[in-house]
Image (spheres, rainbow, N blue to C red):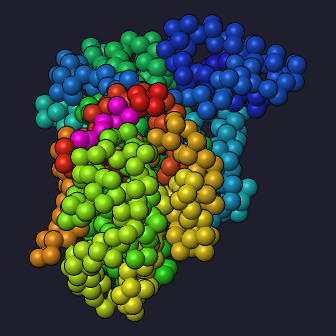
């Protein structure tokens, strides 16, 4: 015991007392636990170097984590495929069968049987502090635990403390009554802890075989609380639960394993399963206990999580992704993970933002525009039921046709200029057919044009003049179709005086077009709010005034909001970032073209090649939403995801487009408003990336 006291004091002084040593040594050990167990002398040497650097030389710069290592802009997500494939674990059934040979099966609790949905265990203190209405509580709580352990060691030679010991210190530092603090923290643990689905299946299989199962934990939660927490997570029927604070000794020093073994006959065989390579593996093996190492899900996943997010939302997001992908129960497809990791937070955050804005403005109905609105509306309907919503068929082409009286210049730019400059070579006849103007084809020859002629830079001016000279006829053609649109709008709005129109982006022409039709052309007594996920304009598509006066509002970024994200999205990857972003919100139906005069909908080419991708991406988004909703059910404030945070997972994956190019190479679509209908020619994302040199 005397030697152990000396060792512990030395460890505290050299590894934890100095802030510089602490900030480097702890993370290094966490990332090199196997090395720490097998060659501990390397880590003692590292401690010597760190103490020389920070204590003797008094340096403030990093020693081992130099600027290059800490430059988060150099970090990358997992790009080789499905990240869940990194968690190589035996099938739960086979793992359970391998354990049946032992007389006593022992489980570590936290990060083995039970998960917290946070990047680091201590991050739950941010929630506790909020519930206690105490600023800087995260740091106060950590300092209180440290002080309580030192005091306990000085009195008893043991660092093992209880939650009450910790909150006695918190009370002195804050005035918060200790009993209130203890109750609040434990309730918070109950609110957020959940069963590791892999281990829960293993546990169930072992219980069915009537095996003797125990739990062993180094923790400040006493036995009764630990049992309650385990039962809350669905684990009941342990023969015994051993907690270090109840015995004054722990797994790391081996004393708790001695306690366990003394409770069973000498000839019993033991196996212990845990995530810490020292306290669960090395220390147990020193006590002649067989071990099974369950690699910590956060050790696997944290290096692939987006950086720069706000502390609480970022930790909660990372905790959900890590525990879902790396527990070992299932492997997922890259498409599913694209939705779960990189799109789920954005869709959930945007939908919650929409609802909050709608409540604030007194909106009576929400229009989710096709096709991007499909996934938004699915999530919205699962979250809220107080403001009705409608999936409204709309598109760029429909908007151009039915608002031409107010947007002739935009019509000509998108129909003529964009298509003449596009990579797809379209005939003039196919262009006219794509916008329901095939009846004008026989008049093309008056402008030295014919239907088979390719639209290009040389003849675009003639074609533009042709359309301008026939603008009255064009408007009449569209007015016949627009009768059905007006009927649809009247029926959908009903008596609502305020509606919100929702789209993904980018200029806002779709929502603004409906606003013009409803408020101006139809002169309805209804205010239309236009909300976008993000706004990105290119020269010639100026919407800065609408953004400035809030005619258009954005959740994630625009030129005058979250400008850093706007610049990254707009200026990297050769202007292609819109495409992988829109993959999150595609739908499994073709683009809406407009109305037939009988009221039926017109649709474009069904992009069936994409539907399997889309379904998997959406499944990932929905599963992320479900996990997030379930785990935040007692803390609704966690739904308040800033647009900045919501974009960062996507910003992380587009640092390197290899993943997107590899798995979405054959994702087909048209950049030029529905492509070439006549020949049904579309472009793949991979082809576009290669054309621009990516």
**Residue visible at 52% across and 63% down?**
554
**Which residues are the magenta region?**
681-688
Q: Nearer the viewer, residue 195 or 635?
A: 635
> Where residue 439 sits: x, y (%)?
19, 65
Say above or below: 253 vs 595: above
Q: Is residue 607 left or right of residue 542?
A: left
> Where residue 120 sits: x, y (%)?
53, 39
Q: Which image quadrant for residue 128?
A: bottom right
**Residue visible at 58% across and 21% down?**
29
In the picture, which quadrant includes the N terminus?
top right
Q: Is residue 16 left or right of residue 599?
A: right
Q: Nearer the viewer, residue 155 or 123?
A: 123
Inspect the magenta stretch and tell me whether residue 435 lies in it: no
**Residue visible at 44% across and 55% down?**
461
Q: Is residue 669 visible?
A: no
Q: Is residue 46 visible?
A: yes
Say above or below: 613 vs 556: above
Say above or below: 173 vs 471: above
Inspect the magenta stretch and tell me whether residue 686 lies in it: yes
Q: Is residue 692 left or right of residue 178?
A: left
Q: Nearer the viewer, residue 349 or 505?
A: 505
> Where residue 140 sits: x, y (%)?
69, 50
Say above or below: 551 vs 233: below
């Amino acid at each position: 015991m005397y030697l152990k006291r000396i060792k512990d004091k030395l460890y505290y002084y050299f590894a934890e007392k100095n802030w510089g040593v602490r900030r480097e040594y702890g993370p290094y050990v966490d990332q090199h636990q196997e090395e720490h167990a097998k060659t501990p002398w390397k880590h003692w040497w590292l401690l010597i170097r760190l103490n020389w650097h920070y204590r003797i030389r008094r340096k403030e710069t990093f020693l081992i984590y130099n600027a290059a290592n800490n430059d988060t802009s150099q970090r990358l997500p997992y790009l080789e495929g499905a990240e869940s494939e990194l968690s190589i674990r035996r099938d739960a059934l086979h793992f359970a069968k391998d354990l049946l040979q032992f007389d006593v099966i022992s489980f570590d609790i936290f990060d083995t049987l039970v998960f917290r949905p946070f990047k680091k265990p201590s991050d739950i203190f941010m929630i506790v502090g909020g519930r206690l209405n105490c600023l800087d509580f995260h740091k106060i709580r950590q300092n209180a635990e440290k002080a309580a352990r030192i005091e306990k060691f000085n009195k008893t030679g043991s660092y093992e403390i209880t939650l009450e010991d910790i909150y006695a210190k918190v009370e002195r530092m804050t005035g918060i009554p200790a009993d209130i603090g203890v109750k609040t923290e434990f309730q918070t643990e109950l609110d957020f802890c959940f069963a590791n689905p892999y281990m829960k299946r293993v546990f169930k299989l072992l219980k069915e075989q009537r095996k003797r199962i125990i739990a062993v934990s180094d923790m400040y939660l006493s036995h009764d609380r630990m049992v309650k927490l385990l039962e809350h997570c669905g684990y009941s029927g342990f023969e015994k639960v051993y907690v270090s604070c109840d015995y004054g000794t722990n797994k790391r020093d081996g004393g708790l394993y001695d306690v366990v073994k003394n409770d069973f006959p000498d000839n019993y065989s033991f196996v212990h399963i845990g995530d810490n390579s020292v306290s669960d593996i090395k220390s147990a093996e020193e006590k002649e206990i067989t071990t099974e190492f369950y690699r910590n899900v956060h050790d696997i996943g944290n290096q692939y999580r987006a950086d720069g997010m706000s502390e609480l939302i970022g930790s909660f997001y990372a905790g959900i992704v890590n525990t879902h992908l790396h527990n070992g129960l299932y492997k997922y497809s890259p498409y599913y993970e694209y939705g779960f990791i990189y799109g789920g937070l954005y869709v959930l955050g945007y939908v919650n933002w929409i609802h909050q804005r709608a409540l604030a403005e007194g909106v009576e109905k929400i229009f989710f525009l096709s096709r991007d609105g499909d996934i938004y509306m699915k999530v919205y309907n699962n979250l809220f039921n107080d403001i009705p919503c409608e999936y409204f068929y709309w598109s760029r082409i429909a908007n151009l046709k039915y608002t031409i009286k107010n947007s002739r210049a935009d019509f000509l730019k998108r129909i003529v200029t964009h298509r003449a400059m596009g990579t797809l070579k379209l005939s003039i006849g196919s262009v006219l057919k794509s916008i329901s103007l095939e009846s004008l084809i026989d008049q093309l020859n008056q402008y030295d044009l014919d239907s088979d002629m390719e639209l290009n830079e040389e003849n675009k001016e003639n074609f533009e003049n042709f359309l301008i000279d026939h603008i009255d006829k064009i408007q009449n053609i569209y007015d016949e179709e627009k009768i059905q649109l007006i009927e649809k709008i009247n029926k959908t709005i009903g008596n609502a005086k305020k509606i919100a129109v929702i789209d993904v982006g980018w200029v806002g022409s779709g929502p603004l077009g409906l606003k013009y039709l409803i408020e101006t052309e139809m002169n309805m007594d209804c205010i239309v709010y236009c909300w976008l996920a993000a706004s990105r304009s290119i020269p010639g598509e100026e919407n800065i005034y609408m953004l400035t006066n809030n005619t258009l509002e954005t959740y994630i970024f625009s030129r005058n909001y979250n400008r850093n994200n706007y610049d990254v999205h707009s200026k990297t990857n050769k202007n292609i970032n819109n495409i992988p972003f829109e993959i999150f919100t595609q739908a499994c139906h073709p683009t809406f073209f407009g109305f037939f005069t009988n009221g039926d909908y017109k649709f474009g080419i069904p992009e069936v090649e994409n539907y399997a991708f889309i379904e998997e991406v959406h499944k990932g988004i929905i599963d992320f939403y479900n996990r997030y909703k379930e785990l935040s059910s007692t803390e609704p404030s966690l739904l308040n995801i800033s647009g900045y945070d919501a974009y960062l997972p996507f910003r992380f994956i587009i640092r390197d487009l290899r993943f997107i190019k590899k798995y979405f190479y054959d994702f087909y679509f048209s950049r030029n408003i529905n492509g070439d209908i006549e020949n049904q020619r579309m472009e793949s994302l991979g082809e576009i990336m290669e054309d621009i040199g990516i």
